[in-house]
Image (cartoon, helix red, strand yellow):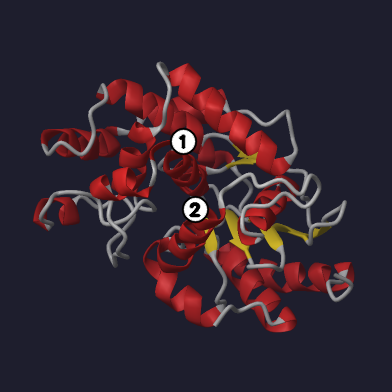
Amino acid sequence: MSCYKQEDLIKMVEEANRLTHKGKVADYIPALGEADPSTLAVAIYTGEQECMYAGNIEERFTLQSISKVLTLALALMDRGTDYVFQRVGMEPTGDPFNSISKLETSVPSKPLNPMINAGALAVTDMLVGNTVEDKLERLLKFIRQLTGNENISYNPVVAQSEFETADLNRSLCYFMRQHGVIESNIEMLINLYTKHCAIEMNCNDLAKLGYIIGNEGRDPNSDQTVIPLEIARIVKTFMVTCGMYNASGEFAIKVGIPAKSGVSGGILGSVPHGVGIGIYGPALDEKGNSIGGLRLLELLSKQYNLSIF
């Protein structure tokens, strides 16, 4: 699409970067605390050969909560919608992403949606495979197909850092196992969960992945369906309603595109039948979203009329 101009992207990154000093990197996961908070980069993919970009788009970062989108798509492909949504709900929540309170007060005691930690842990439990390694390799193969990058893997240092600091997630798992939501060995589940959160890529990869989700699951290069149409639609809907933690409503009004953020500072954007967007800016606001990335998406949405509403 010729309307997207690299010089515009550079100006927008420069403007959004003025906010990064107000944010803070996610140092509660020690390995993430080493990121440079002044970093901000964006790639836009339109289904053609190359991404348009601004900033250091080659810098790699871990997906963190963005991986919840991918595990949900794969679990739905593995198990079907009835199985998945018997165990995980479809409703947004105003609570923080790592909250346990709704599990205690909901009847039945299942997570409200797949984008909060409890829901993502339950979804991770549904992935097909005999071992942690089997399940992780299937997920990586799926992501490599979506991005066209055969070198994508996970960062073992970040994964280990998360594994060692995952006591709250362990608590969520034990609560859900008590109520029959999950069945796995908890340590094996946390092992898989922390590894898929530590899957690493750059903005180009993320933009290409976002394009396929927005393009109803079809790869523009092979014209093959990588994600079934109905599952791509379900995933996009969750990105709209729950993708930006408990700031999703405000984001829908200000930006209006399906998106998912992670505490590493990544943001995945999927404009239906439009573009895929990959952003990296590790300085976070108080709700865990990239502060520069949010501003950048506001500018992009306004400049190119990207809102789906």
Vertical placement of 228 versus 216: above or below? above
297 left or right of 69 in image: right
Reply above or below: 205 against 195: below
Q: Which mark is residue 282?
A: none
> Which tag is nearer the camera, tag 1 or tag 2?
2
Q: How many marks?
A: 2
User: Residue 257, position in %: x, y?
Assistant: 57, 71
Residue at left 47%, top 25%?
135
SS state under label 1: helix
Quickly name the residue at label 2. 231
Q: Hey, which quadrant is residue 205 in on the image?
A: top right
Q: Quadrant of residue 144?
A: top right
Mark 2 neighbour class, 10 Å CA radius: few under 14, some 14 to 19, many 20 or more: many
Instruction: Residue 275: tell me if it is visible.
Output: yes
The residue positioned 74% from the left and 67% from the top of the image is: 13
* Vertical order, 65 against 165 (above or below): below
